[in-house]
Image: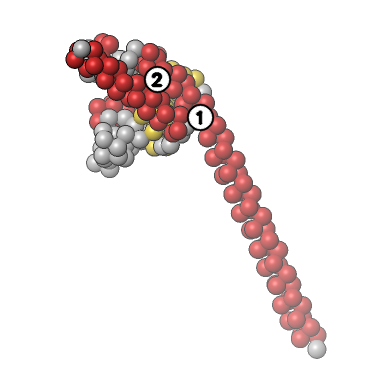
Amino acid sequence: MIASGLVFFSLVYSRAERKRTERGRNVMRISSEKISTDQAEFQKKIDEKYMRQAIRQAKKAYELDETPIGCVIVREGKVIGRGYNRRNTDKNPLAHAEITAIRKASRKLGDWRLEECTLYVTLEPCQMCAGAIVQSRVARVVVGCMNPKAGCAGSILNLLDMKEFNHQVQLETGVMEEECSALMKEFFKELRMKQKMRKKSLAE
């Protein structure tokens, strides 16, 4: 009788212990999910903050009748490089937003390696800029809108994540995508109107 009672007590205790353990695991899982969600929300706010600064750079290009692309590079919460497209203004095929920002950030740090840096750009980088990003060892890239015709961070190909290279870049896309895309669309709409007016004036 005593032995049977002990066995029964042991079974009941084991079941209760298992339930407590399962409850504990569920609480830990829920807590972990909440922490992950909070971290993601916090990172989103940071990314939007710096993408707004990149958009401000893009608007500088717009004012010069340049394709509105802007870029900022951030390290430890500080902007260390800024750039905007000046290709036509400078008559220089290298005068892309990312290249300018990388050059300024390297000068600021006194090093060509931009490790632990995040690069924010309003439009998906081209092959030249994607290559420069890999070469400068940028840790993370945040893109506003994609560039289906010439983008090399996922559209045509992804040079930022080539296993054959000795450096891969973490990529986040679609941050403030609507705002970045709207700026591009507005620019090209105005450009087409100007071209039509120019043709019309030449025909008269």
Q: Is residue 82 left or right of residue 134?
A: right
Q: Is residue 48 left or right of residue 26?
A: left
| Disc on the earlier residue, 1 or 2 | 1
- Image coords of residue 86 (percent x, y): 30, 15
User: Which image quadrant for residue 42?
Assistant: top right
Q: Which residue is mark 2?
A: 58
Q: Residue at x 54, y 40 (%)?
A: 40
Q: Which residue is mark 1?
A: 48
Look at the image and tell me in which quarter the C terminus lies: top left
Residue 106 appears in the figure:
no
**In the figure, 101 relative to 9: above or below?**
above
Q: Nearer the viewer, residue 129 or 21?
A: 129
Q: Nearer the viewer, residue 89 or 183?
A: 183
Residue 51 appears in the figure:
yes
Give the residue type at disc 1.
Glu
- Image coords of residue 167 (percent x, y): 31, 35
**In the figure, 45 relative to 101: above or below?**
below
- Mark 2, Cα crowd under 10 Å, few <14 / some 14-19 / many 20+, is many
- Image coords of residue 75 (percent x, y): 46, 23
